[in-house]
Amino acid sequence: MMNIALALGGLVNVLEYVFHSSNMRIRIDANRYGYPDLSLVRVPEVYEDHRELALLNPIFVLEVTSPSSLMRDRVEKPDLYFAATSIEAYLIVDQDRPRADLYARTRAGMFARLAMLKLLFRCQCWIANCRWRRSIAASSLKRPRIARATSNRAGASHR
C-alpha cells in the first residue's frame, strides 16, 4: 500500500492535494461512511465536524484487494463510492495479480471503467515487492537454459 501511495504521490502537487490512509473515513451521505485504503482530497480539506474524523470532499479513492476483500472491493464498494458526489475516480488494485481497474465519473455524472491497467505502477520498489513479479523472477531463475546462456557469454568474454 505504501508503495502505491509513493508512486501516486509523485503524480500530484503536494501543495494542492493531500493523501489520507485507511484511518480516515469518508462520508458518503448522512448515514453511510467508507474507509478506503487511500483517498486523495483537493485542498482545502472539508470535514464533517471539528473532530476531523470524516472527510467530506475526497476526489479519488483506492482499494487494494485481498482474497478476503475481493468481492466487497469490486462489487459492494463501487456503489458506495459512486454515491459520493465529490469522488471523481475509484481505482481497484489487485494484490495477488497484476491488475488494476480505474473507474471515473463521466460528464453525465455516471461512472465508467476507463481501462484495465496491467502493471500500472512502474515504481521499482512496488514491482520488486509484488508477489506476482517475484514468482516470475523465481521461475526464470530455475530455468537451466538461462543459466547456461549466461555462463557461455561470460566464458566467451575471457578468451
Image (cartoon, rainbow, N blue to C red):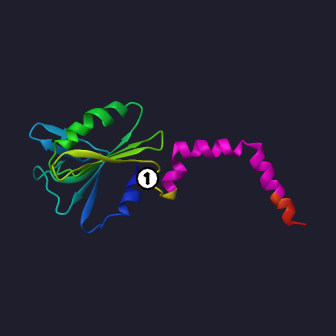
Residue at the farthest front position: 108
Q: Residue 118: horizontal and vertical position, in percent?
A: 45, 48
Above or below 153: residue 66: above
**Which residues are drawn in magenta?**
125-152
Q: Residue at x 84, y 56 (%)?
A: 152
Looking at the rendering, in which quadrant would you find the C terminus? bottom right
Looking at the rendered structure, the kind of residue marked 1 is Leu
Question: Dot 1 corresponds to which residue?
Answer: 120
Check if residue 153 falls in the magenta segment: no
- Write the residue at 17% across / 58% down: 45
Task: Count residues near mark 1 (Cα–Cα under 10 Å), then give few for <14, some for 14-19, many for 20+.
Answer: some
- Is 60 placed left or right of 51 in the picture? right
Labels in figure, total:
1
32 and 84: which one is in front? 84
Q: Residue at x 28, y 44 (%)?
A: 36
Q: Quadrant of residue 82?
A: top left
Q: Residue at x 32, y 36 (%)?
A: 74
Quick check: is 126 in the magenta stretch? yes
The secondary structure that most of the magenta stretch takes on is helix
Under circle 1, the secondary element is: loop
Instruction: Note whether 42 is above or below 24 in the view shown.
Output: below
- 138 horizontally vs 102: left or right: right
Residue 70, quarter of picture:
top left
Drawn side of residue 152 relative to residue 6, left or right? right
Residue 80 visible in the current orientation: yes
Residue 120 % position (x, y)? 43, 52
